[in-house]
Image: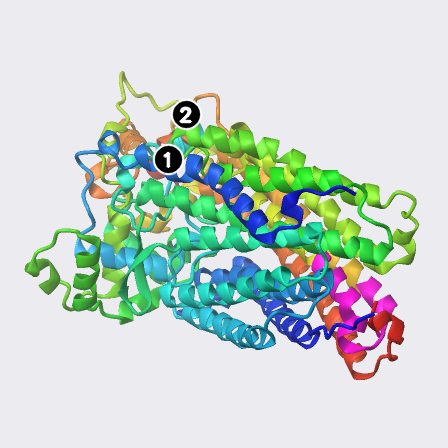
Amino acid sequence: MSSHAWEKKPVLLLILATVTILVGTIFTMVLPFAWVNTEHDRIETVSPYSPLEQAGRDLYIREGCNNCHTQTVRPLVAEVLRYGDYSKSGEFIYDRPHLWGSRRTGPDLARLGGKYPDEWHYQHMVAPTSMIPKSNMPAYGFLNDNLIDPDAVKKAMDVLGFPYSSNDIAQLEGKTEMDAMVAYLQKLGTGIPWRKAAEVEIIGELVNPFPKEPTAIAAGELLYAENCAACHGEELEGQIGPELDQDVYSDDELFELIYVGVTDAGMPSFASLGSTKVWQIVNFINYRETP
Amino acid sequence: METVNYNYAIVRSFITWSIIWGVVTVLVGVLISFQLVLPELNFAPYLTYGRLRPIHTNAGIFGWGIGSFFALFYYMVQRLCRTSLWSDGLAKFQLWFFNATIITAAVTLLLGYTTSKEYHELEWPVDIMVVILWVAFAINIIMTIVKRREPQMYVSLWFMLASLVGVAILYLVNAAEVPVSLFKSYSAYAGTNDANVQWWFGHNAVAMVLTAPPLAVFYYFLPKATGAPIYSHRLSIVAFWSLIFMYLWTGAHHLLWTPVPDWVQTLAMAFSVMLIAPSWGSVFNGYLTMNGQWHQMRENYLVKFLILGITFYGLQTLQGPLQAVRSFSSFIHYTEWVPGHVHMGAMGWVSLVLFAAIYYLVPKIYGRELYSIPLANLHFWLVLVGQLIYSISLWVAGLQQAGMWHAMNNDGSLTYTFMEAFVEMYPYWWMRGVGGLIYLVGILVFIVNLIKTAQGGKPAPEAIQNA
């Protein structure tokens, strides 16, 4: 059988294999550096992490959160509805390493910042099922027991070249790992003012399509338990969010609060539920049988 | 004929240790799969899913996978070159250093020292240990090939050499990082660049660790097990060069619809589809080798492992390109489907071929015949059924999950919340755990068979020992 020179010369084979491997490498791994993180990608409003946020980011890495949570919203209709505006390259220029992840056992976190109030996160990290009843997330209460080491954070900030003041470092004294984690989670996706931009505007008059209908109230009760009870209490008695007594809000006010959310107060928008379900919740809150 | 003093001792040691790390892989895998359904099985801070999952993947890739390849490459390179190993001392050092590295890796990961990069979680000091290990291995293999007494290099040696250089390039580039302290570093790349480098690494680790080496093993052990030569030398050549050329373009198919430039995604998608050809080149070469030999599927347990292995490789390399297409990726990416896919490759393709090779070597490394072929058959069926339960339940789970994530009402709202889709996963996660348990039992049967062989199997005839 005739054979080629490279079948008899190992060094030649090694060289040829290296060259072969490098072609695709240069085109798809080296060349993109000329496109990515350039001026074209830059977004004015995106800022580096503060010392506390960076400390939280390092904890996110330490605990392997990226094994269950992604941090990129794709430009797909359902995904943007569920999580928020799709991710832009310029939002990640301070991410070393990136934390985009590959599996969503839990939800995507790219737009988590500002969705919930801090208190929600503190409770959720200690006991995930207290906020999300059927969650399988491990409990991370031990983060409350550990203090941040300001010197280590300072060193990290120096290596990353992020700006900070001596006051920033001094303020880390006494902060727990939980404080850092929550600060980081609240930073996620806030580099662009997408939440304001995506805010729903209601035009025209709102009319409750099924006022006091028992079926709507029953459906609303289930939806309330799933989406609202964690913050407003199972008996609507209020907890992280305010108490929801009957007759505080009119039907259309309540609809608008739920559908649009209160961006600055940590009340998420529930527009993705659709108006029918939101009306059912309104009917439950305002017309349920009270003891 | 001049006799060669082959070093089988090192082969036996590496096989023993790779099996030990293989058991760790599956044990941790089973534990974390049950953590998904029983979150109280998380024992913070050390034994949480987030810290254990990298131990599962690293033990699988570095311990079981690469550990076995160390063993099998050292066996094949000596036989194919008709010469003893270049350096027995270096190989011995490598064995000890291999175990030291894996133990260090496991401990540091438990302590939360991780870079977060998938399949490259090890922090910089452990990275350096991995590099030393690979250099020692590469030198020994290359020098043994250089001093060979067989002019022609068989196809298995090409795949070995490509793997040696490929892993070196991938690992070094992706490891670029700036240390802050002994066990903490920051990636040299940021954001989108970091993601693109990482998945260039991630996908080609599949090429250079979980494709080229098992193909080297397959091309060697299929003819050995069947007695039939590989069907086509020319097909081997075409499949080899086109495989190592095309693979490197495909990493960004892990990043479809992300901020990575569109043209990089499109190239990745196109090359992923083209990659079907070289992959199936090897599959066909395997199937056609079986021309006139198919009766061995019934009579020869080794052939069953090898042919099912290459069949899973064929299915894997059809499913992979399907997932790499933008439209299908938009649907299926991030769902349970993906671990179903990965485990067909890991538990089906790679592990079945490794089991076959280890069984084949038993008479040589222990000097005894295999204790029980029925037990080997039982092992085969347990791991096959375990893997199918695992993968199929996750494919179904992924389809349902994707359907629920994307479902929309007429008014443009989402039909399901995240948690409504999430709770539907619990039954599938139970099945995945059960599939893993069955696989684990299969591996225990394998180990019992090997221990019984080593302890008191019938001595293998001289002829087999020197074949």
**Which image quarter: residue B258?**
top left
- Horizontal side of B399 relative to B298 (left or right) equals left
Query: At which x and y percent is residue A181?
Result: 28, 57
Q: Nearer the viewer, residue B275 or A70?
A: B275
Q: Which residue is mark 1?
A: A31
Q: Which residue is mark 2?
A: A210
Taking the view exactly as shown, the residue that stands out farthest to the bottom is B455
Specify the segment rendered in magenta: B352-378
The disc, 1 or 2, on the residue closer to the chain's N-terminal end is 1
- Give the chain letter at badge 2: A
> Number of callouts in the render?
2
Q: Nearer the viewer, residue B327 or B70?
A: B70
Q: Where B87 falls versus B305 (above or below)?
A: below
At mark 2, the secondary structure is loop
Query: At which x and y percent is residue B272?
Result: 57, 34
Query: Type of residue at label 1?
Result: Leu
- Horizontal side of B446 relative to B372 (left or right) equals left
- Give the chain letter at badge 1: A
- Mark whose residue sits in front, 1 or 2: 1
Q: Where B440 falls versus A186 (above or below)?
A: below
Q: How are the residues colored?
A: rainbow
Q: Quadrant of the C terminus of chain B?
A: bottom right
Whole-number angstrom distance, CA of label 1 to CA of label 2: 59 Å
Query: Type of residue at label 2?
Result: Phe
Does the stretch in magenta take in B371? yes
Does the stretch in magenta take in B5? no
- Horizontal side of B56 relative to A257 (left or right) equals right
Q: Nearer the viewer, residue A202 or B58?
A: B58
- Residue at x 88% of width, y 42% of height: B291
Query: At which x and y percent is residue A165?
Result: 8, 56
